[in-house]
Image: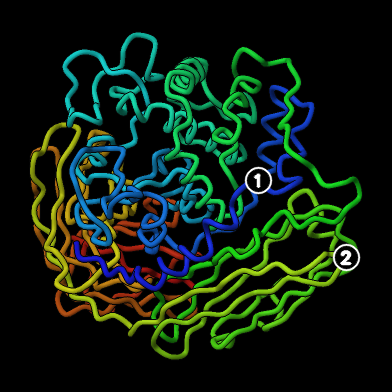
Amino acid sequence: MRVSLRFFSFAATVAMTVPAMLAEVPAGYYSRLEGKSGAALKTAVFEVINPHTQVSSYSNLPRYFEQTDVYPSSRQWWDMYSNVQRFAPSFSGLNREHAFPKSWWKLNGSVEYTPAYVDLNHLYPSDGPANQAKSNYPLGMTAANPKFDNGVSKIGYPVSGQGGGAQYVYEPADEYKGDFARTYFYMVTCYQNLTWNSTWMLQQNDYPTLNSWAVNLLLQWHRDDPVSQKEVDRNEVVYGYQNNRNPFIDFPDLAEYIWGNKVGESFSPGTVNPPAGDPILINPVNNTSLDFGEVAVGNKITSLLYLKGENISGTASIRISGTDRNMFTLDPAASSPTLTTTVSGALINSRNGYQLQVTYRPTSLGEHKAKITIYDANLVGTTTVNLIGEALEVPTLSRLTAYGASDITASSYKATWSEAPEVVDYYLFTRQRFVGGNMVEETIECDENYVVIDDFNASDNENYFVQSSRLGYLSEPSNVISISHSGISGINEDAPLSAESYPGIIRFRCGATQTDGRIFDTTGRLVMLLPEITDGLEITLPYGIYMIVTAEHRTPIKLIAR
């Protein structure tokens, strides 16, 4: 995949603004943890790290990786999944990897409803083949003769007592086992309020959240592989973007007070707090950057800037200034976008702080910079946040060609498609699973022009098609591939089909008769069969939104019943 990455001015800006300001944790950041243990301590950590500034988008993750996951002595990507040498800024061969699998919390195929999807504390660049092999398996020690072993990552059957019922587990190299353990500690604490779809390592509760075998494994890895300088440095840079930290890196013993051999003892962060009653703005960190990445001119992208403080009285003023200030706006509480706003100290002091929407709306091509200044109330001095964005032309995307599935087994297959001839951010693979007459649609973001599906046995048969994505735009859907457990049952171009919606009726338009029409509601439930659809056919449906596929048009068409 070709990825356009304009790092040079961005990297220079970060180099000037990040290292100098992050020498230590700000006063008061961890004060809420004082004297707590076990479940109460875990919830206190959740309250400190959960609300945070959300980075701009999945597409722009490589821009952040350029600062978080490159060896300091070279331009080589620091890949914890393989020993393949690759050099920035090219992201070719790498994936944006959720170390904590996104399928464990996603809802009906959607993962972008939560900041966890773009949380840098568990996102790493990963070798493509290793990432595909890892799939969504839990962590664990592999038994002899793993099915995948590249010298750094292993996937195989779990040793006795591990895996939580999963067929395979993922085992990282010894030098990274602690990194993954602390990543998982962070995720099950920062997002203890999410609903989990996987029970291999997780329980649906605030505490302990981890199953007992997972607690034992992660604590052992955490103890055997102590915090490295790599983690310390990465934690600081991520803090500069997200305004939250991984406390299990800052305080390695913290895990023992929550799950380990110090449960029941009172934890003290030992950090210096400001004098009692003094006002302090904990977040955002002064002179950090809010980078919106690349955006199509005329489009917009919004990020959330997290404000958190203590003992702030009065009202804080927030202002955007700088040469390109008109490209950025503040969108407080659904009011009209402005360059200035105010936020009460009570909101900033509140347990959850305040999430300020900041929007980048470029009206001209090129790089744009401005800054946010936070002042007034009873704050001493000002806090500055640098705003960065780059506007590009609206992309023109070619229609891709999906190829027939290969490597088909009872439980898996490999789907491939043509590579986009232009720059794209990623490929969006849409999978339609048919189970007992119902359809379940799932989308998967892919960094390469292939994906391995490893739960084919969960469906009766499937369709898939693919699109490319660039700057939030999608290409026209590819042809649709149909696959059954006896092999490929069809490689189809969609025949023309459209639907017109009128009060009380839906009228179909098609150039030729279409067959095997199936209408599904938004839950994927089959609600109507249409053995034959001719031009002008009219039907009625209860008020709502539906999808239809036919034997000749396998890409879903939306139906709106009025």
Residue in the image at 34% along x and 51% along y:
70
The disc, 2 or 1, on the residue closer to the chain's N-terminal end is 1
| Residue 165 position in % (x across, y down) | 37, 19
Dots 2 and 1: beta carbons under 8 Å? no
- Residue 109 in view, yes or no: yes
| Residue 519 position in % (x across, y down) | 34, 59
Judging by the rendered image, the residue that carries numbered circle 2 is 378
Colouring scheme applied when the structure was drawn: rainbow
Q: Quadrant of residue 418?
A: bottom left
Above or below — where is 241 with respect to 322? above
Residue in the image at 51% along x and 48% along y:
116
Residue in the image at 53% along x and 64% along y:
17
Direction from residue 227 to residue 398 in the image, left or right? left
Residue in the image at 41% along x and 63% along y:
546
Q: How many marks?
A: 2
| Residue 302 position in % (x across, y down) | 54, 70
- Which residue extends farthest top? 160
Q: Secondary structure at mark 2?
A: loop
| Residue 139 position in % (x across, y down) | 37, 26
Above or below — where is 104 with respect to 495? above
Q: Secondary structure at mark 1?
A: loop
Q: Quadrant of residue 327?
A: bottom right
Residue type highlighted by circle 1: Val
Residue type highlighted by circle 2: Asn
Where does the N terminus fall, quadrant-wise?
bottom left
Above or below — where is 365 with respect to 243? below
The mark found on residue 284 in the picture is: none
Q: Nearer the viewer, residue 13 or 79?
A: 13
Judging by the rendered image, the residue that carries numbered circle 1 is 25
Above or below — where is 189 with respect to 6? above
- Residue 543 in view, yes or no: no
